[in-house]
Amino acid sequence: MNDEFYVKVDDEEKGPYTFDQLTDGRLEPDDEVRTPFSDWQKASEIPDFLEYFKYEGYYFPTEETLAGFGIRLAAYVIDYVILVFLLVIGLATYVSVTAPGSDVNEFILKNEELIRTIVAPVSLIAYFVITAMLPMSASIGQYACKLIIVNAEGQKIGPGQAFLRGVFKFLSGAFLGVGFLGVIFSKYKQGFHDVMSRTYVVRKDVY
């Protein structure tokens, strides 16, 4: 590891600084840094600082860290199973409270269109919005697969991005899952919902 760094501040070179001096909490990912043997780079692009930024809660979307289609599909399958389970439990609870003694299956069949067009979509959107807003910044399936949702700066997303991502994720799957295919073909492995909400899915296990 290098222990002599220079930082560009207002187009003026400052330094040298040691690693500890730079990582006392003031180094930002976009700060331009160089060593005596390298050109200027963003601090986030220098391997010496990756652990520091990870500790600070950054997970940068790079070619090496972006999650591919396979692992994201595995995460979605886990989420789908969880969603179906929660939906069934929720409907069963609703029936037991509002109509004690009624048959749950009969209720589902009787209200199939309402459940399919409103209850299920709202539940799906709410699930992905709420989980993305939690400290883990990932759905349960993504967390199990060691994935995290981040913005372009490598930070956890806020409520606004989480809401947009949840809505557009529903739309990604609403048309035969076409919106998910972008993960295979796009440069940054983004589905339609990722592009529209300006988010990325990163693998935590490669750090």
Image: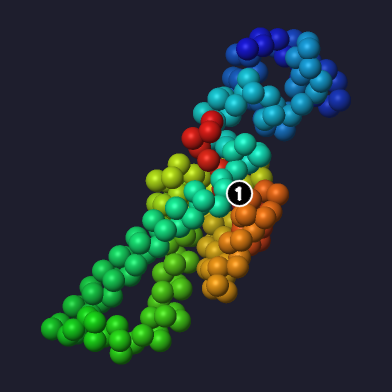
Provide residue 135's location: percent of width, then percent of height: 45, 45
The quadrant in which the C terminus is found is top right
Rendered location of residue 83, percent (x, y): 37, 64
**Front-lying residue, 158 or 197:** 197
Badge 1: residue crowd in 10 Å (few <14, some 14–19, many ≥20) = many
Q: Which quadrant, please, contains the N terminus?
A: top right
**Can you tell which quarter of the image residue 175 is in?**
bottom right
Residue 176, can we see it? Answer: yes
Up the image or down, 12 lies above or below 190; here it is above
Q: Is residue 139 found left or right of 163 in the rendered image? A: left
Q: Nearer the viewer, residue 114 or 28?
A: 114
Amino acid at pointer 1: Tyr
Q: Quadrant of residue 179?
A: bottom right
The mark total stands at 1
Task: Please tell me which residue is depicted at 45% across the width and 49% down the height of the picture.
Answer: 142
Residue with the mark numbered 1: 200
The residue depicted at 44 percent of the width and 67 percent of the height is: 124
